[in-house]
Image (cartoon, helix red, strand yellow):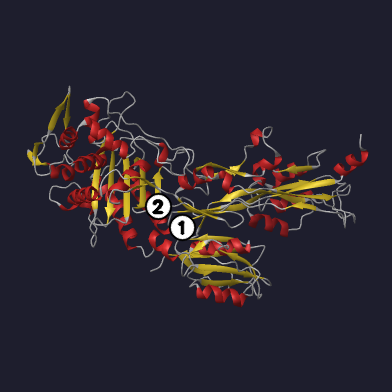
Amino acid sequence: MDLTKKTEQKYSQNKVLLGKRGTIYDVSGNIIAEDSNVYSVYAILDKKYNDTDGKPLHVVNKKKTAKVLSKYLPLSQKKILTYLKKKNQFQVEFGSAGKNLSLNTKKKIEAEKLPGIRFTDTPSRLYPNGTFASHIVGLAQLANTDEKKKATDEDDEKLTGILGIEKYFNNALTGTNGLQTSKRDTFGYEIPNSKVVTKQPKNGSSIYLTLDSRLQSYLEQLMTNVQEKYKPVKMTAVLMNAKNGKIIAASQRPTFNASTKKGIASMWRDSLVEDTYEPGSVFKLLTVSAAIDAGTYKPNEYFQSGSIKVADRTIYDWDKDGWGWIPYYQAIPRSSNTGLVKIEQQLGAKKYAKYLKKFHVGEKTGITLPGEVSGNLNLKSKVSQATTSFGQGVNVTVIQMMQYLSAIANNGTMVQPQIVDHAISNNGQVKNYDTKVVDHPIKASTAKKVRKLMEQVVYSDYGTGGAYKIPGYKIAVKTGTAQIAGSDGNYLTGSSNYVFSVAGMAPAKNPKYILYVTMQQPKKMTDSESQMMSRLFNPLMKRALKSEVNDEDLDANSISMPKLTGTSLSTAKSKLKKLGLTVSQVGSGSKVVQQLPAAGEKVIKNQRVVLLTEGAMTMPNIKGWSKNDVLKLAEITGADFKLTGTGYASSQSIKAGNIIPSDDTVTVKLKEPD
């Protein structure tokens, strides 16, 4: 036995230096998910545990300790005293009541200066926006402690993505832990002047999503309002840039609050990519696109509406009596099933199958989200061909529908839906996720003709989408009502047992945006399907069209954030002023020691940059700051901030110029602008 080596091991201590998990941002650099810490409190009971000067490092006065801790833990003084009186224990914890403590609670307990009371910190993930594209952003948590035999201690200290972007990009987001090895005496104290070997940790990459926080937050608010009013079983909404496929806002109901985890048990699946459904009449757009592109569509010829027999099955229009003999150009605006069946028959089964293949129906889109399914397409019989023409018997995902619709909105060029804009690695390397053209299933002239038919849905006397008019803008729309297959294979009956949907493009002549909304089985159907859907569709599309900054503007006006740390404050301010950025200073010094956003990150003109200087950490005047700017301040200072309300900062508990406290909470009230 090598006694020297054995002794070195005994008196050496390894400390894991945690590599931070990368931050997730929106397209403008606003924080969506970031690393944080929670704390667990424990008490050392061993009376022999003192420092080298004999000062007790164990609990001395158990009654006093129990009384003080009861102010901060959800435990009675009596219960805490029970823990502290345990025999033959070196240290004790306080069950779940002593875990997941905030930094603020930890600081308050530390301020009491109780001998023997210590803390361990545990990495956690902070989602400051709560319910915010929760299934897309996802969740990260510590490695499963039930599988410690399979995982190293280092793995147990790492956060692992279990849902959404957090899961899909887990390897990129995960930091690499470092290690610090030092020599300790028999009491566990570091030996003075001994060699400390340090392997520095590496932080994970930062991910920038395509989401716009302003429109995303507005969508969440609208969805909650509609959910409460009509009580649908399920609901989805996606707003996408028609030109490049970037998803600007997207959500679903049911959803969950990523901060509190409330609701996660009732809906684990990402409905946008993991759930398939029969799309109904919105799918008619693909059928008529194929017929127009192939030259078999005869808009001015007439057909008998109401019903049509295909093989041994009779197919009806939603109005079973029909509208008599009507021209084919009215089939889309009236949403006539019989018209689409005849259009498909005139096109022919082989050509129809060829066009659906060009639209990539039944294939995954390849979006950077976990769990995507491919859907299903069945064209084996004349009946299945006929029902597919109007969106029944074919199964799709919401994301697939967004991809198909992009071909119509984008003059025949079909683009892949995209949720990630770019990523920045620990060493500053930028990886851009560029627009991906999937195919060109139809000609530009075809797409324009289809959009003209969609305009008739809104603006003609016989259209089904009059509720979707938005003053000042021309909108192209297709409505949908799809039956739902029951567990026995038969379609459900009843006025609300449908998937209602609407797909819209605006402005109709040259669409910037595609908005697709679905609502399944509303329990309180107090309005028509169009009225229900328009409560979400109209305000969101209007807000997007009026938005001062869209994705194209961001691409054109984005600036790469310069490295300012180590420079003088005056130099940093001068650089940022020339770039058209807003500067806020924290601290009384003249040298920049930290900056947010970090060097290399994309920013846009007028975006706020927070600079931390050396010296006393002074509070800036934050009146009028956005919520995300306040969160930047909290991150750069490490202080505990409590935000109440919504909108912009209207008041702050610490006056501008005062020292930001390390042992208290800074309260900021937010208020919507008048």
User: In this view of the protein, which residue sits in the foreground, 435 or 367?
Assistant: 435
Quadrant assignment for the N terminus: top right
Q: Residue at x 60, y 76 (%)?
A: 571
Please provide percent x and percent y for residue 178.
Answer: 71, 49
Residue that badge 2 annotates: 246
Query: Where residue 27 is drawn, which disc sits there?
Result: 1
Q: Around disc 2, counting alpha carbons within 10 Å, would you say few (fewer than 14), some (14 to 19), or many (20 or more)?
A: many
Q: Is residue 498 left or right of residue 297?
A: right
139 is higher (above) or lower (below) than 241: above
For label 1, the SS is loop
Left or right? Give the position of 345 relative to 245: left
Q: Is residue 518 above or below residue 344?
A: below
Toward the viewer: 515 or 208?
Answer: 208
Which residue occupies 21% across, 49% down? 454
Mark 2 and mark 1 residues within 8 Å of each other at the beta carbon: yes
Q: Residue 659 at x, y = what percent?
A: 65, 71
**Residue extending furthest toward the left:** 325
Quadrant into which the C terminus falls: bottom left
Amino acid under disc 2 = Lys
Question: Callout 2: helix, strand or loop?
Answer: loop
Identified at 59% across, 60% down, the residue is: 635
